[in-house]
Image (cartoon, helix red, strand yellow):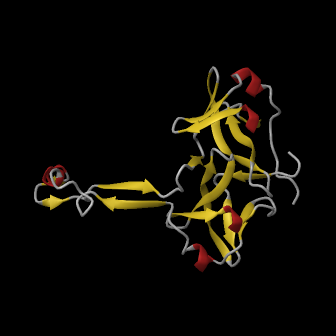
Amino acid sequence: MAGTTPLTIGADVSCTDGVCGKVSRLVIDPRARTVTHLVVNDCQLQGRLVPLNLVDVDATAGTIRLRCAIAEFEKLHPADVTVSLLGNDADPENSNDQLLMYSLGRRLLDPPSATYNTLPSGEVAVSRGDHVHATDGHIGQIQGLVIDPGSHQITHVLLQEGHAFGRKDVAIPLGAVTGVNQNGIQLNITKQQVKGLPSGWHRSPG
C-alpha cells in the first residue's frame, strides 16, 4: 500500500496547539468512494465534523494532525444534534401521552429526545465495530480505511478478522467492496478469500 495513508478509527487527533480528541467515525461519499470528513470526539465526547482538507494525512504514525487550532476546531459543525420531543418538535397530539410515559409520580424524568446526524446529504459514516460481511457471512469488524492522500480516494478497508484469540488485521482492496449501508460493509469475496489476504498493515512513510 505504498503511497497511501490509513485512517484508523480511535486514533488520537491533535490541533496545532494540542490534543483535541479521537476519531470516532469516518464519513464517506459512497458514489465517489472518497473520505470527506472525520468525526472527532472532544473531551466531552461531542463529535465534530472535520473536513478532510483540514487533516494532515501525511502526519507521522500515531496521531492525526489538524491544520487548525483548538479554538477553531471547537467552532466546527457538530456531527449530531439532539432535539426534545416535548418542545416545538413534539407532535401536539402525542405530547400529553409522552409526558405521562416519561413521568414517575409527580417527578418528571429526563424528557424524551431524539438525536440526528448532520452528515452531508448522500454520505454515510462508518464506525469501529461496524460489521463486514463476506458473500457467505460475517467475517469481522471495520478498523478504518486506507486512502490516497492526494485524491482522498479509498483504496482499502481495514478489517479485524476473527474473534478474541487468533484475531488478525487485514487490508481488503476496495474492489472487493460492493456496498456500505446500515448493516455494515458488503464484500464480493468469501470468508476463505479474506482469510487468504496478507495479515497486517502499516502506515506508509510520509
Residue 62's quadrant in the figure? bottom right
Return the x and y of residue 77 as percentages of the image width and height: 52, 68
Picture layout, residue 138 above or below residue 70: above
State which quadrant residue 63 falls in.
bottom right
Q: Is residue 188 left or right of residue 74?
A: right
Placement of 10 over or under 199, stated as above or below: below
Residue 200 visible, this orientation: yes
Q: Residue at x 74, y 27 (%)?
A: 194
Q: How many marks?
A: 0
| Residue name at image x 10 percent, y 59 percent | 106
Q: Quadrant of residue 136?
A: top right
Asked if residue 173 shows in the view, the reply is: no
The location of residue 13, given as percent across then percent down, is 67, 65
Residue located at (53% from left, 35% from top): 183
x 55%, y 71%: residue: 76
Q: Point out the image quarter for the C terminus.
A: bottom right
Figure check: 5 above or below 19: above
Classify residue 91 as left or right of residue 55: left
Q: Which quarter shows the N terminus? A: top right
Comparing 119 with 75, the one in front is 119
Where does residue 192 sit, x and y in percent of width and height? Answer: 74, 21
Residue 126: percent from left, percent from top: 59, 46
From what the image shows, is residue 182 above or below residue 106? above
Which is more toward the observer, 76 or 109?
76
